Amino acid sequence: MFIIQAGIILVFCRILHYPLSKLRQPRVIAEVIGGVLLGPSVMGRVPGFTAAIFPTAAMPNLTLVANLGLVLFLFLVGLEVDLRYLASNWKVALSVGAAGMALPFGLGCAIAWGLYNQFRNEPGTVHIGFGVYMLFIGIAMAITAFPVLCRILTELKLLSTPVGIVVLSAGVGNDVVGWILLALCVALVNTGTGLTALWVLLTCLGYILFLVPSQFDRASCGFFERLDGPSQSVVALTLLIALTSSFFTGIIGVHPIFGAFLAGLICPHEGGFAIKVTEKIEDLVSTLFLPLYFALSGLSTNLGLLNDGITWAYVIGVIAIAFLAKFTGGAFAARLNGLVWRESFTIGTLMSCKGLVELIVLNIGLQAKILSTRTFTIFVVMALVTTFGTTPLTAALYPPWYQKKLEAWKRGEIDWDTGSPLISDDGSSTKDIVAAEKLESGKVQRLLVYLRLDNMPTLLAFVSLLGGRPQALMPRMHPQQEAAMSSDGTGPSPDERLKRPIDVHGVRLLQLTERDSSVMKVSEVEEYSIHDPVINTFRTFGQLHNLAVSGEVTVVPESSYADVLITKASDMLSDLMLLPWSETGSMSEAQMISTDVAKNKLYSASYSNFIATTLENASCNAAIFVNNGFGGRVKQKPMLLTRSVSGLSLRHHQREHAASTPVADRSHHVFFPFFGGADDRVALRLVLQMAENQDVTATLIHYHTTAASFEDVKASTSQSAQSASTSAKRATTALTPTASSERDAAFFSSLRHSLPADLAMRVLFESKQSTNLLADAMEQARAEVGQSPRNAGDLIVLGRNVNANVLAADAGTSSTSSEARGCLGPAAEAVVASGIRASVLVVQARGKGLE
């Protein structure tokens, strides 16, 4: 019977969660609604349903498993609570948390008088004093759902904002104080006298003091560091501590969940121990145990008892007090801490979220017979309404456009009333000055790199080309001789002695899932950024190659990867955003990459859509890097041969693990066909900057069409509908043999004649006329790249030119996917599909003055 009950509950809750997830609602909403529908309110009215599926004799087994899940879940809640947030933001946490609890607690005590007198004599309750009843109702009104709060903040991308920091800090304190008050209330109910309750609380306090010492922390961290993650023995020891703790608090007269919460609270967060333990047990708890528990809450809810006017008046009153009291207390406290009104209102809305913690409190009250079934139903409706409304209200009060405007206003960049940029003394805005400096310099000074584990060797090799010559390689001079040469004017110039390094910021994106451990990673993302091996490898490599490197880890849903990169690039005022093409052919960073997967990596629709979305909305220049042996060839898997036993075959394993020899030739050759347009102009600047590296040589050829060939292509594309004529004209302006072509030719010629002498030795400029641009460029590319198999890899640089009809006509059709062509552009897609032995860098221009 238990298997049938569990199966029905799980399937029912999963089906309900799908539509509710589209409204950004937490899973607990679906689980409680599922229980309500399966209970006496809906399905219970079907004759024989309750007797057949949920008979009274079978409910103890279901309740036992659900309560075990509740204990484990409260242990996870304790793991999720990081007291370091409370310590680092204690002032705001104390004020917002205290105001957010005091006002609803006081109003809850007021409405408790009416509830106590109206419903205290209903069946299923025991006689208790008004003081205990008032305490319980006040707790139910004042508590905040910390786990659901973390999920909402993460999904709305508010965790790193001032609103998120304040709410998270206040939520931690609110959660801890709420559970302590609940333990006091349960102790008073179970003991019956104040003296016995005092003894219980003192015993509980002594137990807390027994758990607090750091011996458990040091032992756990020691196991964790030695084993690079908690082993089965460590997980078993941790769970044993949680179960023992819950047993002890249950025996002394509090509640088992309080002991489990304490056990989770004392677990160390250093080194990611709490996150790793959560990952081990969260799936079983969240997919099996919790749905059973909250479905039981729904089964205990009977909406049919809300059948008169006075009951509905209390429903409305309870909802109003639960929301308005929390909203008012949190908002005014946040305003006193210096936040603007709209931020304060958002904090008040978030603090009013009840969620699954409220339901746990209500179930404890129902089991202790403090609440009747009718009163329990009133508060369940309140919990559902306040939880359901938190996400849409927060999104409406604090939308992304308002966050950006507020941040710009706080930085002094815009006028609040008009939203226009502030004008400097010389009459120009800040953004115009930055844009002018970027266009004037032409070189990449701020680079944003999307770090992927499968692309790290390639990214390190490419970014090192932009680092220039490290200071350690500069010739050393005696200080006195250097001073004498400087006075004579024969010494090195300041620019030669000290070159400003490029600012490189690496962003590693981790997928945010529905698991609690994923949300914990978000709350501890700063520590993750400090200790992440990918970020640290990138940081160390950059420092050794004359780069000013920084990095961060961001945990967001996969659908938000593009938005995060665009926002980071905009905030940093990046000159270039570098996006590597996935070696796995998907969004995953799987370490097991087969040869077939690497060959078909361009066929991934999901990654193509991600790149296309990023390029479409990017506010700075962007480049896509498609690797093909850049930085040195990867060791290939040896062929499997069938041979007889011999001395050679016995030594076969030694050849499999032979060391790779150092790259003798560290040179790179870059081929760049210049077709014209904004994309190619930006790409040309980038190629010349890479060529400043002593190991880089480059061939730059300007391909241009004759007037006759252009007219043929133009005639072939003029048969489109009149509605598309404007876009077609705009798409071909980059290659028309008129003003734009003359501008491209002048640009190419000016850079050619202004080339420094040391750079002219490694860079070759040419100009060619062609009737088939892409075919001639690919033929030249085969002759230019891949000629030195032992070098560090060659590179073909192309402008994206995704709307260039001339190149699209030359490219024709290929074996790769249409998504890849739309993402990389016709020229780059044709080059990648041709199998030329070189990596490809596709550049797209964005920004004022580049079109």
Image (spheres, grey):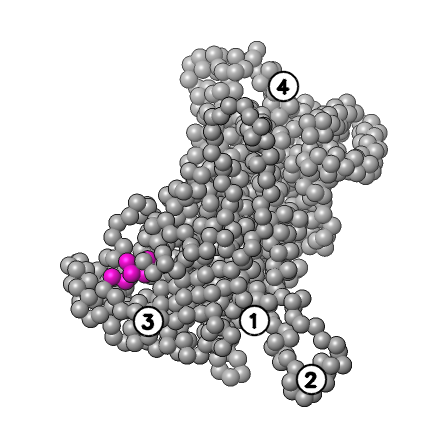
Of all residues shown, which one is farthest toward the front? 647
Query: Which is nearer the N-term, disc 3 or disc 2?
Result: 2
Circle 4 SS class: helix
Residue, disc 2: 485
Judge whether 360 appears above or below 586 on screen.
Answer: above
Q: Residue type at mark 3? A: Ser
Q: Tell me the tag on residue 767.
A: 3
Circle 2 SS class: helix
The range drawn in magenta is 772-778
Query: Which residue lies at the image location 62% right of the left edge and 26% below the top edge?
Result: 69
Task: Report crowding for label 4: few under 14, some 14 to 19, many 20 or more residues within 10 A (C-alpha).
Answer: few
Q: Tell me the tag on residue 831.
A: none
Q: Tell me the tag on residue 412.
A: 1
- Which is more toward the observer, 390 or 505? 505
- Which is more toward the observer, 301 or 277? 277
Mark 1 → mark 3, Cα distance in angstroms: 48 Å
Left or right placement of residue 812 versus residue 819 in this view: left
Task: Report crowding for label 1: few under 14, some 14 to 19, many 20 or more residues within 10 A (C-alpha).
Answer: few
Mark 3 → mark 4, Cα distance in angstroms: 81 Å
Mark 4 → mark 2, Cα distance in angstroms: 87 Å
Residue 231, percent from left and from top: 69, 30
Query: Which is nearer the N-term, disc 1 or disc 4?
Result: 4
Residue, disc 4: 64
